[in-house]
Every structure is written in C-alpha cells, then in structure tokens.
Image: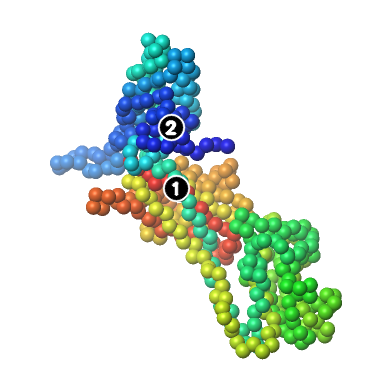
Amino acid sequence: MVAAAGDRVTRPGHIQYGALLLGPGTPYRWKRLSGWEELPAIDSGTVPQSDAHGAFPGRLLAQARTIGLDGLMVRAPRDRIGAVVGALSAGTAIVEDEQPLVVWLDERGPLLSYARAVRRIVPTGIGYRTGSIQGGAVQWEATDPRRYALAEQVATARLPASERGLDWRVPDAAARQFPDAAAAGLGPLDGWYAEGGTLSLDADDRVMFEVAEGGALIVWPLPIPTGYSVPEGGTAEWVARDLPAGAQLQLHWIDAAGVFLSATSAPVGAAVVEGVAPAGAVGVRPVMTWPQVPPGGPVWVGRSVLYVPAPGASGLAWPLEFGTPGSTGALSVTNAGDAPAHPVIEFRGPVERPSLTKTGTGETLEYDLPLAAGDVLTVDTGAGTVLLNQTASRLGTASTRSVPEQTFTLAPGELVGGALVPTTTPLIFRAAPGSTDPAASVTVRWRSAYW
C-alpha cells in the first residue's frame, strides 16, 4: 500500500521527502531552508514601449522552484553513523519521477510540493568518528513551483434530475409503499427475489440486476406470500420512476393459496402498468422482467411505487411522502490558497458529451464522445491531458466550446483586511440532450495552491 504524502510529518520543523523524514526527533537536523517561502524565479513578458516611457506589462510565469536545505547535521552513535548516512543517501538518490516534498514550518501547517533531489552534500571528516557530521546540504528542484495543501479535496455531482414530487390520487386509492429502501431502489437485498440474473449492490448501495438470459425477472420485497392485498375487482397501479432499459412491468395476480392466476403486462419500456384483479385474486406481486438481454452490464432497478385500493380511505394520509430530492448537477470548489489551482476532473458514464462549466465565467470543458457504464474520462488540467480509462488519449474529442485544459483553473483566494479569504468557484455538470442516466457523474479533485 502506497503511503500518503507527509504521513510521517507531525510537528513544525519536519520535512519529509518521499519516505525520508528530517527534523526534530530524527538523526537529521537542519538550520536553514531557502526557496520555500520565497517567490520562484519569474519569466517576464514585459516589453519596453518604443515611443514612450515605460513598458507594456506582459505575463509573469514562474519557473521551477529550487529548494535548499543548509546546515544539515547528521547525528548517530559511532557504530551506526554509516547506516544513518546511507539512509540519507538512499532517500535523496537520483530518481526519474518527482517525489512528494512536505514541509511544516509554523502554525499554518504543512504544505506539499513535488520535487527531485538534485544536490546532496555530506562532509567526510572527523564527524564519522564522533557520530556528529555538520555542514551538510540537500537541494531539490520542483518543476511545478506552486505549493499545495496536504489534504486533497473532492466534490461530486450527478446529471440534473427532477424531484419525484408528491403523488396525488383519487380518494378511494392510497399508496402502499414498498419498504422505504426498496421504494428508493436501495439495499439491503433481503426479501428481493430474482430469476435468470444476479442481484447485487453497487458502491452507492443501489440494487443492481445483471440479466443473464431472456425472460429474467425480479420481484420486489413482499409483505406476505400473496403479495400486496388487492380484492377481486380492485385496481392496482405500479409506477417505475427510473425504468431500466429493455424492462417490462407486470402485475402478477395471486389467490389465497398463493397460486399465480394471471398477469397484467405493460409494453416494454412503459413506466406504468395498471390492472384489475381477476376473480379469486387476493393480492398482487410487482414483477419487472426483461424479454431480451440488454447490453451494458448491470442496471439499477430504480425507484418505484405501488398503488392499491384502500377501503374507507378519505384522501391523502399523513405523513405525506413528497419524494426524494432531485439533482441540479451543480457543485462548488474552494481554493484557500493564493495561487490558481489546477483540478483533476473525472467524468463517469453512461453519458454522452459530458461537460463541466464555471457558471461565473462560462468557461467550459466539453468532450464530444459517449462514455459507457464503467468508463472514466480523466481530465488533468495541470498536465493538459485527457485520458479514457487511464490509457487512451481523447484530447482530440474536445468540442469547439471547450477551453484549453491548462487554462481551466480554480481562482485563488483574496487578501481582505490582512487575511487570505478563500474563493469558491461554482460549477455545473451537463451532457448532450437526452443523456440523463442518474448513474453518470463528475468528480473534481483539487488541492488549495500557494505561491
């Protein structure tokens, strides 16, 4: 298991590079750190005016940050000094990839950079015999000059979806809700019944069904073997809020002995089925079936409600069920630092032409491609890459509305009254018209950034 960056840093004075910890409580003490609080070297695009005093201001672009640790002291028992120096050498060896460099200076807490060791000095002299080596130094180079908050933040949103709302029915009918979790299409799986396929729970505790053969079916949890009570001649109605692709709704009528009498079926794809209980019926079972095997793997059974007669009912009864909240597709991210932050954005299918837009500026990242269930399109705005399932580049699918990835940054905080106030950026997740699958999502990962 890969350790988290800075996992050994516990107090001011600690510096951790990869797995190597320097500072209080270690054999490695230091006196000075340069290049950490200073601004990195700057490339200025300012050019002189040809016909007037002064110049035209240009962009200021930070170069790589050079960080120097001076006055390094290595202390250990004489019979272990070699091993301690060897650990320092191994921890600052030449590597190809940048390693996390975490520095904790004061009450503001630790900050993170990514760097490589480019210089190491360990004087050889009497210190090897006394167990105290002084005058050492380490230097690192960070190609990204920004420093970051140690904690990565995450925000997620799903595509817009309307609220279910309150269902109104005539006074002689009342809703016999399934158990609350089952009505919402959520686990546990106790009481569910399936044939010709496999029931499971996904990461969000949703009940998923993978159809293995045509004619596969599932039955919602029932109060008794004969199902939900419906007298002969009574009417039952089953409404599926999120009908899966290829599914067909059926009402199975049952007699007092628990024997199947007949079925009322809706057309494939219809989200409502209504029927009248035949002679001898005492109950109904809601059944969802698939005449054919749909493509795409497991599907969510969705939310649903069953309406059956309620003799003597005079109308709506309290407590009223107003439905689960909908989704706006909106999310917000906050940068508490003083430098722009580049987020990593993950679009998850099934969705077509996913996009993420800053509502304040209109800047958009949009990709003209379909994502199937299980697909993840990762946009690294710092690196300027767009990868499908971490392997194939899809940079060329950016639509004409899309801005260059590396320009899509989170605005830094502002200095107000001597204090740095975080800036929040509102975002919205959208897709092509007709792409409304509730399983689609966007996840934004970022760290507050500092100069």
Q: Residue at x 49, y 43 (%)?
A: 385
Q: Residues within 10 Å of mark 1 (few under 14, many from 20)?
A: many
Give the amino acid type for the residue marked by disc 2 in the picture: Gln
Query: Tag 2's secondary structure?
Result: strand
Which of labels 1 and 2 is toward the front? 2
> 155 or 126: which is nearer to us?
126
Coloured how?
rainbow
Q: Residue at x 58, y 37 (%)?
A: 1
Q: Residue at x 55, y 49 (%)?
A: 377
Q: Which residue is disc 2 drawn over? A: 16
Q: Is residue 202 left or right of residue 94?
A: right
Percent from the top left, x then y, of residue 194? 76, 63
Q: Quadrant of residue 38?
A: top left
Q: Residues within 10 Å of mark 2 (few under 14, many from 20)?
A: many
Q: Which residue is disc 1 drawn over? A: 446
Q: Is residue 220 left or right of residue 91?
A: right
Percent from the top left, x then y, of residue 244? 67, 65
Residue 146, relative to residue 404: is it above or below? above
Residue 320, relative to residue 50: is it above or below? below
Q: Is residue 357 left or right of residue 261?
A: left
Examine the rendering and report whether any part of residue 359 can be seen.
yes
Q: Is residue 17 left or right of residue 414?
A: right
Percent from the top left, x then y, of residue 434? 57, 65
Give the amino acid type for the residue marked by disc 1 in the picture: Trp
Residue 207, relative to residue 168: is it above or below? above
Q: Residue at x 57, y 53 (%)?
A: 348
> 400 or 182: which is nearer to us?
182
> Does label 1 or label 2 sit earlier along the sequence?
2
Percent from the top left, x then y, of residue 145? 37, 37
